[in-house]
Amino acid sequence: MKKHLLTLATVLLAAGALLTSCANDPEEPQIQSDGTQISTRAYSQKSPKIMVYVETNDVNPLNALCWEMNGEKFIDILNLFASNIHKDADGYPTVYLNDKLTRILEPDPNNPTETGFHKYVKPLQDEDIKVCMTSLGDWQGIGVANMTPEMADRYADILVYCVDRYGLDGINFDDEYANYTSQVYNSYSHVIKALHAKLDAKFGAGNKLITVFQWGNYNQIDVTAGGMIDYADHGNFGPNVFLYSSSILGVTNDRWMPQAINLGYSYSTLNLTQIKNRSLENATNGYAGIMMFNLRPCNEVNPQPVFQAIANGAYDSATVTNVCGCDSPYTQDWEFIEGGFELTKDDVPAYAPTYTGN
């Protein structure tokens, strides 16, 4: 296991794009007292789904627990934004968790059952919120668009290990900040196909999620790989933005999220009416969900007006409530681990089946 000095990429929203970084140190998968592996729970059956990205550099993901509708949590899927794609000395991809994400996932060895994912992931899952880890470039010259089939196979092994070890519900991909100098034909498809096969073999068909942020080199995703994506969303943020179909081959509207809303802003009455109307259109036409980026603590930017506008349109005006109160949000209460951690192909098992590019 190699420790690395942290090089946090400055996080921006450029032309509506997402951003950020991540890292980790391996142990064996977590086992319950009865000897069975920790499993994740089913999530809300409501439609459309609510997906949020949480910027783990400065936001506690448990803030998603604060929002309820009809006695259930309002948020269905939470993406931890983000782990990073780095590379080892041989050029193979690695998973890097930055100094801030490390302790959200990786337990403290001195308190292994009450820290890390036990504290920041499992409570969300106990409330039927699916938790996925975003995979993001980090200026290392490597990403989902320049992996050979062998590299994709090795990277998928590491991602499956992360899902297993931290009890995650799946992986989200965001092809940004890779700083490519070259690309490999169909690379993004290789990554998705390898991961899909290994997740199904390890956890059972359909029990884990693969989601994709439609940005970067998504045109490398062929129709077969696109058919393996559970949900796709996009970065054309705005209260009145509604992309009627995905540009990713194989992604049908029942797996597409046509709305993208930045929760880092406050919105006017007109904007909230637009969000309501677009949410009604979303629900009426059977789309998969609504994506929101940058959930903040309520005392920084209150998302309640946006959440209520969505509920007014998509959920028959059900009331969205804050059960925490804006004076007592979940704070950034975890230890930062200098340099973060990195998982390489040599740190994890080789999961079946081996991907060869077919």
Image (cartoon, rainbow, N blue to C red):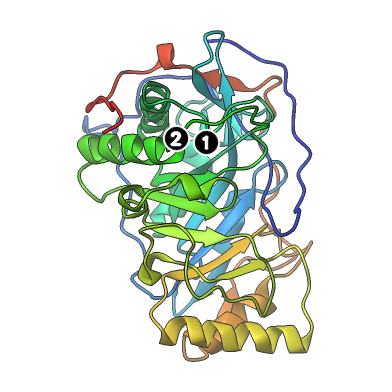
Report x, y in % for residue 258.
52, 71
Q: Is residue 254 left or right of residue 248?
A: left
Quadrant in which residue 270 is drawn: bottom right
Q: Is residue 336 left or right of residue 77?
A: right
* Residues at marks 2 and 1 touching, judged by CB atoms closer than 8 Å: yes
Q: Quadrant location of residue 214?
A: bottom right
Query: Which mark, residue 145?
Result: 1
Image check: 245 left or right of 195?
right
Residue at (77, 48) in percent of width and height: 12
Local crowd size for mark 1, using a 10 Å CA cut-off: few (<14), some (14–19), many (≥20)? many
The one of 297 and 340 positioned closer to us in this rendering: 340
Secondary structure under the numbered disc 1 in the rendered image:
loop
So how many labels did they put on this image?
A: 2
Of 90 and 77, which appears nearest the observer?
Answer: 90
Residue tagged by mark 2?
Answer: 187
CA neighbours of label 2 inside 10 A, class few (<14), some (14 to 19), many (20+): many
Residue at x-position 29% and y-position 38%? 199
Q: Give the image location of residue 49, x and y in percent.
A: 44, 69
Q: In the rendered image of this protein, does residue 301 appear above or below residue 28? A: below
Q: Residue sitting at 38 percent across and 30 percent down? A: 156
